[in-house]
Amino acid sequence: MTYRMIFNQTAFFGRGSISHLVPELRSRNLTKALLITDAVLLETGTAQKVTDLLDEAGFPYEVFSDVAPNPPVENVKAGVEKFKDAGADVLIGLGGGSPQDTAKAVGIIVANPEFSDVLSLEGVADTKNPSIPIIGIPTTAGTASETTINYVITDVANQRKFVCVDPHDIPILAIVDPDLMDSMPRSLKAATGLDALTHAIEGYITKGAWELSDSVHLTAIKMIAANLQKSVEGDLDAGEKMAYASYIAGMGYSNVGLGLVHGMAHPLGGQYDAPHGVANGILLASVMRYNAEYTGEKYRDIADAFGVKGAYDMPLDEARKAACDAVAELTVAIGNPTSISAVGVTEEGLDALADDAFADVCTPGNPREATRDEIRELYASLL
């Protein structure tokens, strides 16, 4: 058995670390950037914290902000044309998963134009060339797109999200500056934090997990358990810890995969436009219970990470239950929905959801092999 681990060439962490952006661009002999972000970050002034640095240094750039949540194929194609027209040689993905995933798809297609239909990038595409250089700058503590080899695009025509896995797309540089995350609204902190927790837990129990990935995932679980609720309530120090925990989880899951929570969350996004973190939060505790008997002793570690006393002394089934209960309680405490009806799902939609989840690229990584009918039952239990 062999294991592969791929990380950023360089990453900076800490408040004020965005100051490293221009020196890093210069040191790589890059000459013009296309900043990919979204309209909200432009309106709130978050993007200006980056463009001000570029302006002050006289570093040329253009902005592409036509990125929607759950970015569709059309956003990617428009971004490719914008990059070509701009004459840029580097992409800056500023935002949560949507702008950063769009940047990855744009960078891959510019370097590998035979994939310009976008849809052919699904799964593990056989790209030949590394992406145009990408700098990932997160403004949320959840997706960890700045350090992963994954990105997710929405096929609107067929109401589905598809996952792309490509070592060629990893950003050459990540800058994790909590100053860019402080203004996130409470609901976004909750949703993205649950996304990070799902990455950490699924990465910890997925079939591909091993000692190195386990070490980063368990660290992330401990950090999120200790800081997510405080961050949602406005504690800036906890928010900083969440920024780092998100990245740490991304280092792991990017290399070993995820599982059924993500497999079931993607159709909720594709068919109902549910925010990804919200969907993960709805599903996580229930899928953990479904997987419990297939996870060995690992739920003891999760229970202990959440502060359950005696997690290593109680019977295993009790420890497993305690881990699931702790996740469920945190989900409620930070105000995430707990039913799929909250995002618009009805009984009539369960079959289509189950079909897409069963076929999702993340589902085979689950520790328990799920049938299509079992997936439907899980959805039905959450109506």
Image: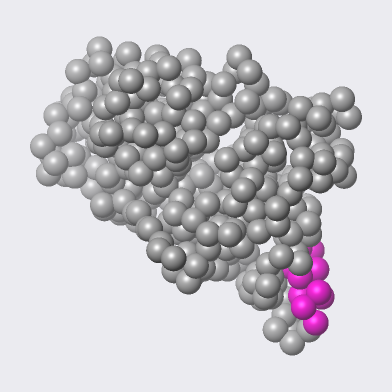
Whether residue 178 sits left or right of residue 278 in the image: it is left
Q: Nearer the viewer, residue 198 or 371?
A: 371
Percent of width and height locating residue 142:
53, 47
Q: Nearer the viewer, residue 297 or 70?
A: 297
Percent of width and height locating residue 360:
62, 38
Percent of width and height locating residue 321:
80, 68
Residue 377 is at least partly visible in this image: yes
- Considering only vertical position in the picture, is 373 above or below 32? below
Instruction: Determine if the magenta segment contains residue 325.
Output: yes
The N terminus sits in image quarter: bottom left
- Considering only vertical position in the picture, is 43 above or below 336? above
Q: Would you identify the image quadrant in which residue 380 lies?
A: top right
Residue 79 is at least partly visible in this image: no
Q: What is the chief secondary structure element of the magenta stretch?
A: helix
Q: Which of 81 and 246 is in front in this view?
A: 81
Q: Which residue lies furthest to the front in this view?
A: 1
The residue lying at 77 percent from left, 78 percent from top is: 316
Q: What stretch is highlighted in magenta?
A: 315-326
Q: Nearer the viewer, residue 5 or 9?
A: 5
Q: How many marks?
A: 0
The residue lying at 41 percent from left, 34 percent from top is: 125
Whether residue 31 sits left or right of residue 263 in the image: it is left
Percent of width and height locating residue 264:
69, 40
Whether residue 201 sits left or right of residue 56 in the image: it is right
Instruction: Determine if the magenta segment contains residue 252.
Output: no
The residue lying at 82 percent from left, 41 percent from top is: 373
